[in-house]
Amino acid sequence: MPSSNNTNFHPSIFLLLGTPGMEAIHAWIAMPFCLVYLNALLGNFSILFIIRMDPNLHEPMYFFLCMLSVADLIISTTAMPKILSLFWFHNREIYFEACLVQVFLIHALCSMASGSILAMAFDCYVAICNPLRHSTILSHRVIKNLGLAIVFSGALLFSPQPFMLRWLPYCKTNIIPHTYCEFMALIKLACSDTRICRIYSLTAAFLTGGLDFILIICSYIVILYIVFSLPSKAAQLKTLGTCGSHVCVILVAYTPAFFSFLTHRFGHNVAPHMHILVANIYLLVPPMVNPLIYGIKTKRIRERFLQGFTSLKF
């Protein structure tokens, strides 16, 4: 049962509230969420299968795309089954340990997804600014080290989160007004001073998404300078086209992330259910849209997907 007194306690179970004020339409909200999740599964598994089976796609850009797809799959699978269970079956309970695991996975994997997008930006930078040395700069060893750095940096940076939440005393309630376990949502339930936790959260957010975004912008400033130095308009458009898919992925990934961050920090007049819906969009839409972007805009991936679909159909 929820507790509302001021006695310190460590709940074994939290209760997810969902979207406050929209409980009557939870079942309807779950339908598009479910479709988004199924499309994310299909799209990312297709990307992984196509790249794995086509030797012509064993290039740095597509290796980092595979990392992004794996991160997207785990992020959406970490959150979506529980959200559907909450919306359709009113299963609000989540064990404290499961809640901590969910917090860690979501934040660590979002960091890894952001790192993968940054690595793809570096690949575009090298391909355009130093094409003759592309294979030398992005050798198999460098790619492997970059991949390991992305994984371990995300895991190490956010590994303190579960321990911070575990050690906090909770004295307000065990009801989480959200659809999944989120670090700041749990911080608000604590009855002790949480300034260090909040500073840590802001610092970690900057060192992942914030710093990655700044480096991506810097790389594209140099890329645009090189592109517009080319002699012909056709060459400029062709060179920019090589990064078109990546630019779309950047917009899809960072726009809802920054909007969610800004509304959470400064949008005090924004309705709570809008905060929650934006947070869900941030987790669910990029994993669905990223495979569509590369499937539509990358000729080799599109052709392999159509070949596979045709063979299944006939």
Image (tube, rainbow, N blue to C red):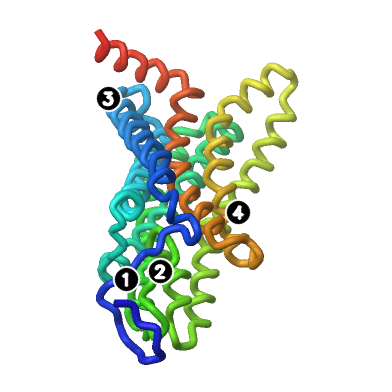
User: Where residue 312 sits: x, y (%)?
Assistant: 25, 15
Alpha-carbon span between mark 4 and mark 1: 27 Å
| Discs 2, 1 touching: Cβ within 8 Å | yes
- Of badges 2 and 4, nearer the viewer stands 2
The residue identified by callout 4 is 259
SS assignment at label 3: helix
In the rendering, which numbered label is found on residue 274? Answer: none
Classify mark 4: residues with Cα within 10 Å, few (<14), some (14-19) or many (20+): some
User: Where residue 238 sits: x, y (%)?
Assistant: 62, 21
SS assignment at label 2: strand
The residue depicted at 53 percent of the width and 52 percent of the height is: 278
| Discs 2, 3 touching: Cβ within 8 Å | no
User: Where residue 287 sits: x, y (%)?
Assistant: 42, 41
SS assignment at label 1: strand
Q: Which numbered disc, 1 or 3, marks the residue that appears first in the sequence? A: 1
- In this rendering, position of residue 23 left or right of residue 96: right
In the rendering, which numbered label is found on residue 14? Answer: 1
Q: Residue furthest top?
A: 314
The residue depicted at 54 percent of the width and 76 percent of the height is: 199
Q: Which numbered disc, 2 or 1, marks the residue that appears first in the sequence? A: 1
Q: Is residue 185 above or below residue 226?
A: below
Alpha-carbon span between mark 4 and mark 3: 37 Å
| Discs 1, 3 touching: Cβ within 8 Å | no
Which quadrant would the N terminus be assigned to in this image? Answer: bottom left
Classify mark 3: residues with Cα within 10 Å, few (<14), some (14-19) or many (20+): few
The residue identified by callout 2 is 176
The residue depicted at 42 percent of the width and 43 percent of the height is: 28
Amino acid type, residue under disc 2 in the picture:
Ile
